[in-house]
Image: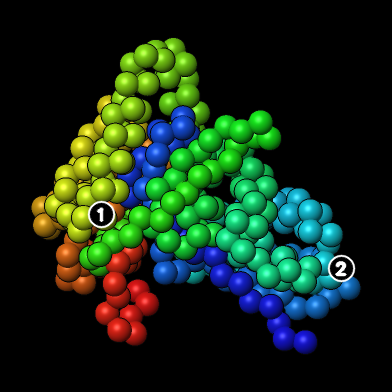
Amino acid sequence: TNPLVAFGAGKVILLGEHSVVYGYPALAGPLSFGVTARGVPARSCQLDVPATADAAQKRLMRKAFSRAARLVGEPKVKVTLEPQLPLSAGLGSSAALAVALSRVLLQAAGRAPSPKETARLAWEMEQEFHGTPSGVDHTTSAEEKLILYRRVQGPAGVVGRAREVKSPRALSVVVALAGARSPTKVTVGALRERQARWPERYRRLFAQVGRLVTEASKAVEAGDLEGLGDAMNVNQGLLGALGLSSPALEDMVYRLRGMGALGAKFTGAGGDGGAVIGLFLEPGPVVAKLTRDGVRCFASQLAGPRPHGDRS
Ligand code: PMV
């Protein structure tokens, strides 16, 4: 029998992190790299955790894996993981892992996993990793497209609604890592307390972000990258107002703007540090310069036509 191989893409949120938890839309796209899972026939259903993970991450991975394995009837497969993404950098490594594992488990159970079925199983794992995530990470990873995502509370719990946003132009970002990252649980939890105390004030800000996201997705569809960049800059201002930014993140945002970014903001949880994205027409020279200056960074095309043969 052939070994099973499945991929789960990392993601970046272009706009709308955090407010997406409260039911407002977010715009997110897949990275071209993520996590690969391989399965070989075995006596029982087992997971080989990556050596690079720390003890807490390993424990969570095992827990999430058993939850998903039970749901597909514990197929007799041994799964190994190959992450190409930094773990816990805000680039959706846990969702990428959940999607890769879901696909391999579904294949091992003799099913051809559709994006919807994959997302449903990955969602079970994400709840082990994150508690109450919005679902934008694993949905973007399972769909592998630029999507407008909204969390909807149904009678059977949270369901995500996603629709593809097509870009007539290549949409490329530079992702740069700045400072030490705060755990998503911490930033999400602190914001939850502030918004519970002053609900009207925070609701206004979330609603403003939601409108920016709608405008940004229209700008993408119209090929208006300047309009998209401006919406990203305003979103960054509102993330600051929500108390989610920091000197390390702001420094990197201004650095990318100084290098000609059409728009720049942090992506994901924010807090003390983490990933910052800049929208660039030509990301190559920016990555070269930042790398020379010692910044961990890479470029990724999130949507739009690709030059022939290019996967980055
Ligand atoms: O864990 P991160 O950095 O990818 O952030 C997730 C995005 C949040 O909106 C902050 C949380 C969520 O569940 O959507």
Identity, as a three-letter code, of the amino acid under mark 1:
Val
Residue 223 position by quadrant: bottom left
Residue under pointer 1? 220
Few, some or many residues within 10 Å of mark 2 (<14, 14–19, 20+): few
The residue positioned farthest toward the bottom in the image shown = 1
Instruction: For the C terminus, give its image quadrant.
Output: bottom left
Instruction: For the N terminus, give its image quadrant.
Output: bottom right
Image coordinates of residue 236 in percent, x first then y, are 25, 39
Please say if 137 is above or below 200: below
Residue 204 badge: none
Nearest to viewer (mark 2 / mark 1): 1
Of the two numbered discs 2 and 1 on the same chain, state the one appearing first in sequence: 2
Residue under pointer 2? 44
> SS class of the residue under badge 2?
loop
Q: Residue at x 33, y 34 (%)?
A: 210
- Asked whether the beta carbons under mark 2 and mark 1 sit within 8 Å of each other, the answer is no
Say how many tags the image has: 2
Identity, as a three-letter code, of the amino acid under mark 2:
Ser
Q: Is residue 56 visible?
A: no
- Cα–Cα gap, marks 2 and 1: 47 Å
Q: Is residue 300 visible?
A: yes
Q: Residue at x 54, y 53 (%)?
A: 138
Return the residue nearer the eye: 17 or 51: 17
The residue positioned farthest toward the right in the image shown = 43
> SS class of the residue under badge 1?
helix
User: Does ligand 1 reach within 8 Å of label 2's beta carbon?
Assistant: no
Q: Residue at x 28, y 29 (%)?
A: 208
Return the residue nearer the eye: 120 or 297: 120
Image coordinates of residue 61 in percent, x first then y, are 67, 55
Please say if 34 is above or below 180: below
